[in-house]
Image (cartoon, rainbow, N blue to C red):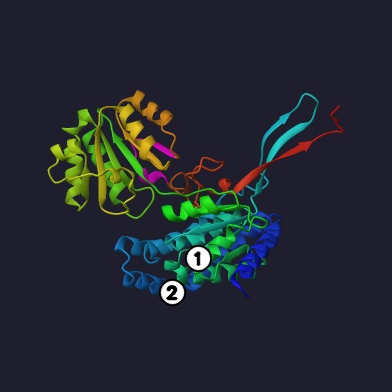
Amino acid sequence: MELREEILQLASRAARAAETLGDLNTSVKNAWLLRAAECLEAAKGEILEANERDMQAARENGVAEPLVNRLGLTGGKWEDMIQGLRDVAALPDPVGEITDSVLRPNGLRVARMRIPLGVIAMIYESRPNVTVDAAALCVKAGNAVILRGGSEAFHSNQALGRVLREAARDIGIPEDAIAVVGTTDRAAIDILLEANRDIDLMIPRGGPGLIRKVMEESTIPVICHDAGVCHIFIDASADTEMATAIVRDSKMRQMAVCNGLETLLVHRDAAQTVLPHVLKALHEEGVEIRGDAATCAVFSEAQAASDDDWAAEYLDKVLAVKVVDDIDAAIEHVRRYGSDHTEVIITNDYSNGLQWQRRITSSTVGVNCSTAFADGFRLGLGAEIGISTSKLHAYGPMGLEGLTTRKFVLTGEGQLRE
């Protein structure tokens, strides 16, 4: 069978499976989630062996170690992945939820009901745990899912997909509700982008090249999970100890994540007092500082930043730092160079905190907290399929509700439009 026919048939089978999923009650979907957790635990050795093959191949191909680490499933990542399935099972099912019910003057009741989107195709890079997270959320929200991971995680994703489909068969859910594309051929992406008869939503999650390709070529609606060029602004009134702790956590907690800090903006009045302490703490942990002239003047270990640094997503021990005149200049910088992901202000000025939250339009905006809170679990969603940077119905961490839409439901007693 040629590739085009294979991919189109996969999409068609997913569409048929989605019809069944939309009718399933919550208990069946939860049973699959719990069975999937059991099956993954039983197949742990096989899956980790496949995962090691991917990591070793990445190293041999010269992939940087922080990016190799993103591929790993060992340690806490495995436990988090398994627990994520159980957490999703414990979440309320959004499908069928009635909201915004109003009675019109003519006695007609108008409400909104949450329904599945249908078939979601997700194209993503690196982290194979996304395979499990995405499948869990899509199925719980009543959607079939087509998963096309990166070639660097091919063996891991195939092993995970086999187990998830096996769990579906055990419970009586159509196994085609969880489809993992079985080829690394990039042409498969081109075919998926054209399959608008069967696929209802495309979600790309990865580097700028992937995002741009999907946005330009898809014939299907797209919600992007783009780069995380996240900012922190240290205001003039910021507390030094708080600023140091928040910046450190935002940058050092985990490097290769989209909610990690990439650019630090500092009010000119805090440049001589707060900034040296913050940068010294980071420098001692091996962070390379790339600063503007004002930053280099107060911190001699800093290197001069280039224009490219302000829009960079490093995913590594590198931080761009810029001194700005005021909150207006900080907001202007974020609007120019940000990626609509996560921006935080550190301040003791209540008015400035409110202004930051109101004027910054990124998907997550914080006051006096780490950028690491831009995460579905930390924000109470239970889990997330990613962090949407598209200003559509789902913006920011995208959980179960973001994987549904709403239809109007009308209840009358013979009302006619005259």
Judge left or right: residue 244 versus residue 59: left
| In-front residue for pair 22/417 | 417
Question: Where's residue 267, x and y in %?
Answer: 25, 30
- The quarter holding residue 99 reads top right
CB atoms of marks 2 and 1 within 8 Å:
no
| In-front residue for pair 287/63 | 63
Q: Which disc, if any, is residue 50?
A: 2
Judge left or right: residue 13 versus residue 345: right
Question: Where's residue 88, x and y in %?
Answer: 54, 54
In the image, which residues are magenta? Answer: 364-374
- Numbered disc in front, either 2 or 1: 1
Judge left or right: residue 258 versus residue 203: left
* Amino acid at pointer 1: Arg
Residue at the far left: name it: 300
Residue at the far front: name it: 216
Q: How many residues crowd around disc 1 within 10 Å: few (fewer than 14), some, or many (20 or more)? A: few
Task: Name the residue at 52% across, 50% down.
Answer: 215
Q: Earlier in the sequence, mark 2 or mark 1?
A: 2
**Position of 30 relative to 185 (above/below):** above
Q: Which disc, if any, is residue 186?
A: 1
**Position of 85 relative to 55 (above/below):** above
Is 370 magenta? The answer is yes
Q: Which disc, if any, is residue 343?
A: none
Helix, strand or loop for disc 1: loop
Q: CA distance from mark 2 to mark 1?
A: 21 Å
Identify the image quadrant of the C terminus. top right
Helix, strand or loop for disc 2: helix
Question: Where's residue 290, x and y in %?
Answer: 22, 45
| In-front residue for pair 369/320 | 320
